[in-house]
Image: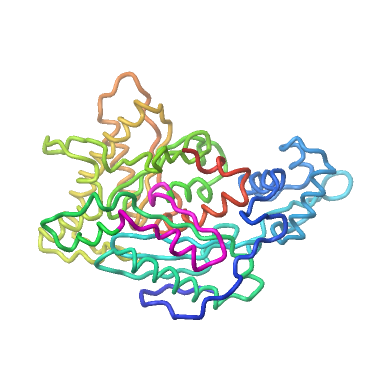
């Protein structure tokens, strides 16, 4: 099942009783600790035989066998190809079953709202996006409910029953961006008093979760990003997401740290000095809206930078100038963050084509190397693994982490 369009979703009657908890879950969806521990280890390490899981968890072989049988019976684990070549019976690795459970992720953005359906492995099964000029709570709620109905109408009944929840990735404090001189921003004030998670949740039987959009994108990198070694998947890293506004996330000891207000690593607000020597904030130089303004000022078309497909076809000179100023600002924000947290790794991702992301990472490395910063070690800067879907997929990972990882603090800490 897959569709990806910019038109409104078809309206369907709201299905009753969807999102029922599968075996082993109570009403809040919390599975037994040892089951979640096994699922978490297999998610991190890939398919494993029972003996390896017993060794990693410290559980007895009998306990692991009971857990694995239960998870397989639930459809959450599936047998892999037997491993032969050793003495005795071949061992059978057990991996996550892609169709064992499904998650919905809603990204509420300033230029578009999108919703996706992901499977247990984080693969996107369905995706729908709708562009808008003015972001309002009413439009976000309507889009979410209409698209969820359309997604569920396309799914067999047995899979509808395995939809485990909806996560929402939302820019926090949007009312701070109301500009009295710009009437188009007036609708942002509505977000101060609206709780769209509660409003959408009232229409469905599955749980709904809310997270800052940049932190959600960081969560996608944490849960679904590259694995295969400490350097590919560091335990601590600063995450940068280039979107309408630049934002950030922070992972400490394999946990997404969101802070008391849920707005930790708000990199856009970090003070920097521009290439012209003026004081400003990172949001002023490293956001896509800044690139849009630069393109318009130079007389170029700018709509392409908001599209997911293909390249931007942005004017080369303008793009080069934006990349340079963004990298200059990012290097300063990275140094400031490293002075405080002693970071060793930084991931840069965003709603940008891969070649633009690669160019930004390369220039940020160069700008970072050019800064004189005695007393600290510069962190390694690398590309993120998710790209355009990071915020929506990170939203989908919220119910996954809450219901199927060791405990919620294994993903969210604040």
The quadrant of the picture occupied by the N terminus is bottom right
The percent position of residue 361, horizontal first and vertical second, equals: 33, 44
Closer to the camera in the image, 95 or 82 = 95
Q: Is residue 33 left or right of residue 151?
A: right
Examine the image and state in which quarter residue 132 appears: bottom left
Q: What is the residue that sits farthest to the top in this orientation? A: 375
x 57%, y 65%: residue: 205
The percent position of residue 89, horizontal first and vertical second, equals: 88, 49
The percent position of residue 32, horizontal first and vertical second, equals: 70, 47
Closer to the camera in the image, 43 or 196 = 196
Q: Which portion, as a residue range, is magenta?
A: 191-215
Q: In this view, does 373 lie to the left or right of 35?
A: left
x 38%, y 69%: residue: 129
Above or below 65: residue 255: above
Above or below 167: residue 140: below
Closer to the camera in the image, 350 or 392 = 392
Examine the image and state in which quarter residue 268 appears: top left
The percent position of residue 332, horizontal first and vertical second, equals: 26, 34
Above or below 271: residue 155: below
How many labels sit on residues?
Answer: 0
x 56%, y 49%: residue: 401
Closer to the camera in the image, 357 or 199 = 199
């Amino acid at each position: 099942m897959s569709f990806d369009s910019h038109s409104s979703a078809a309206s369907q009657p709201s299905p009753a009783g969807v999102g029922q908890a599968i075996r082993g879950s109570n009403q809040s969806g919390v599975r037994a600790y040892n089951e979640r521990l096994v699922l978490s280890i297999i998610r991190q390490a890939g398919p494993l035989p029972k003996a390896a899981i017993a060794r990693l968890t410290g559980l007895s072989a009998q306990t692991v066998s009971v857990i694995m049988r239960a998870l397989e019976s639930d459809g959450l684990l599936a047998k892999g190809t037997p491993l032969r070549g050793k003495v005795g019976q071949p061992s059978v690795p057990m991996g996550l079953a892609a169709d064992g459970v499904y998650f919905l992720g809603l990204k509420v953005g300033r230029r578009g709202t999108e919703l996706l359906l992901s499977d247990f492995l984080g693969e996107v099964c369905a995706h729908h996006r709708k562009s808008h000029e003015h972001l309002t709570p009413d439009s976000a709620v309507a889009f979410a409910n209409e698209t969820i109905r359309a997604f569920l109408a396309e799914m067999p009944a047995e899979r509808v029953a395995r939809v485990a929840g909806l996560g929402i990735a939302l820019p926090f404090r949007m009312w701070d961006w109301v500009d009295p001189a710009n009437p188009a921003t007036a609708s942002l004030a509505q977000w101060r008093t609206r709780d769209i998670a509660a409003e959408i949740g009232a229409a469905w039987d599955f749980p709904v979760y809310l997270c800052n959009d940049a932190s959600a994108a960081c969560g996608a990198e944490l849960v679904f990003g590259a694995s295969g070694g400490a350097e590919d998947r560091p335990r601590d890293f600063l995450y940068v997401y280039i979107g309408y506004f630049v934002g950030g996330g922070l992972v400490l000891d394999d946990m997404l740290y969101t802070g008391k207000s849920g707005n930790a690593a708000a990199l856009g607000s970090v003070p920097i000095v521009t290439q012209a020597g003026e004081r400003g904030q990172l949001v002023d130089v490293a956001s896509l809206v800044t690139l849009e303004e630069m393109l318009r000022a130079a007389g170029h078309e700018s709509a392409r930078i908001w599209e997911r497909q293909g390249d931007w076809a942005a004017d080369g000179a303008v793009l080069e100038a934006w990349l340079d100023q963004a990298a200059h600002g990012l290097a300063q924000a990275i140094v400031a963050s490293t002075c405080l947290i002693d970071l060793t790794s930084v991931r840069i991702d965003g709603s940008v084509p891969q070649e633009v992301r690669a160019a930004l990472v390369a220039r940020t490395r160069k700008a970072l190397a050019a800064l004189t910063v005695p007393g600290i070690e510069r962190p390694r800067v690398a590309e993120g693994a998710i790209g355009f879907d990071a915020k929506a997929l990170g939203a989908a990972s919220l119910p996954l982490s809450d219901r199927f990882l060791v405990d919620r603090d294994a993903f969210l800490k604040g």
